[in-house]
Image (tube, rainbow, N blue to C red):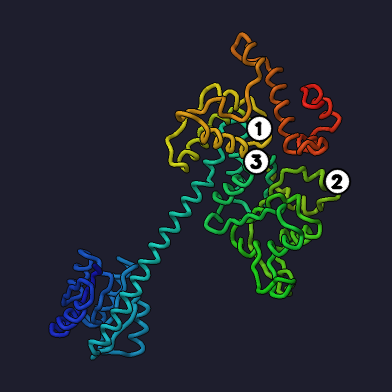
Amino acid sequence: MRQVLVIEDQDTLREAIVEIISELDVKVEGVSSARAGLEAFDRAPAALVLTDLRLESPEAGLEVVRQVRARSPQSEVILMTAFGTVEVAVEAMKSGAFDFLVKPFSMDHLLEKVRKVLGILEERRELERVRGSVALLRDEVDEKFNEGEIVGRSAPMVELFKKVDKVADTTSSVLILGESGTGKELVARAIHRKSRRAGEPFVRVNCGALSEGVLESELFGHEKGAFTGALKDRRGRFELADGGTILLDEIAEVPVATQVRLLRVLQEREFERVGGEETLTVDVRVIAATNRNLQEEVAAGNFREDLFYRLFVIPLDVAPLRDRDEDIPLLCEHFAQKICQDMARPLVEIDPEALKLLRVYGWPGNVRELENVIERAIVLCEDNRVTSADLPFQAPAEAQTVPLPGGFPPLRDVVESVEKQMIARAMDSAKGVKTEAARLLEIKASVLYYKLEKYGLID
């Protein structure tokens, strides 16, 4: 229950005020001096204090205002006085009073003032509750997308973590390089979360998923009537990210015409909406990501050289999973915990033989593929135990029957087995089109034909 404190040296008036305020859903205490009032406040800080101006001294009430506001900034004070001059009002406000009442006043007027202050205090409390909920949700989102999801203890990942720490609190543009599925977005989120902009928006744009016209509208917004279907003004992603960070994912897919506008935003931090004339200014930290070699794209004329150098201030390389296989057990444990929690089922165990097979597989889809494989295995496994039979690929027969003295299968056999599996999957993804399969594998078509014949994958 809210506490209200009344400080008034006229006994009759004090008792009347206490009686009328008691009609509200509050606890009321009345005292006759500033000293007694501050002692009562120290015992039980009141949400609202009503104090007379002239108590032990002509300005004792103002000292009460100052002391209450100093001891409890969230509490409010209404000053009561028979000397309602402009000077008194100004001094009361300077001291921190919420409002003041000029004597004599009606009890209805008093109740109106008290209800107003208590209503505002309740709104503040509700706002703080909402803010606490938002902070909790933000923590939950951060927990989902935080650095903990960038799992790894391998040398490439340790080096990446060090660089993220160094670049996070700068304003420099960052270019994150790495194959699809390596976790480039998670790296970008980690940079944002560790920066001074952490409390501001993090906005991601998938540049490869949108056509040129749609991409410009998505990035820069548009004015009503700018094109067919533009029925109202729309803010773009750069406006939405103002003060925060924008991730331009798949930056290599941006058309050359749009690259010109991006260059201006990077250089000048200003742009116009599509169909608009007003120049808008934003404060945005730009992070770009790509799985392509931008230098080769520049040489081929597909990417502007000046934009490349604007983005290539701080490059960060995210290693493919095949180059950090020692991280696979950690990733498997991480994904198993996450997936089992989402499915509300007991934590599964991954069989050692299955783990060995997971470590020798080539992982063309990187961490994203590993997560999908673990989820599939957890769904299909029996007795909460993932075995090699639950995996979509199997160990080569030679590797199982011809172990080396140290307990390891011959490396040649393992490599050839994995290579055969990758080629078969690429052919399946390309629906049998060999040139497309060669592109997916990033090898020449002639090499693919040779390997198809070698592994008996072609008539």
Q: Is residue 16 above or below residue 226?
A: below
The quarter of the picture where residue 443 lies is top right
| Point 50% across, 49% down: residue | 142
**Amino acid on which disc 3 is placed:** Gly
Does residue 309 appear in the picture of this structure? no
Residue 34's spot in the image, x, y percent? Answer: 21, 75
| Point 49% across, 40% down: residue | 338
Image-based side of 235 in relation to 351, left or right: right
**Amino acid on which disc 2 is placed:** Ala
Q: How many marks?
A: 3
Give the residue at mark 2.
299
Instruction: Give the distance between the C-alpha atoms of the residues marked 3 and 1, in whole angstroms.
Output: 10 Å
Give the residue at mark 3.
181
Image-based side of 125 in relation to 263, left or right: left
Residue 363, disc: 1
Image-based side of 84 in relation to 164, left or right: left
- Does dot 2 land on a helix, a strand or a loop? helix
Q: Nearer the viewer, mark 2 or mark 3?
A: 3
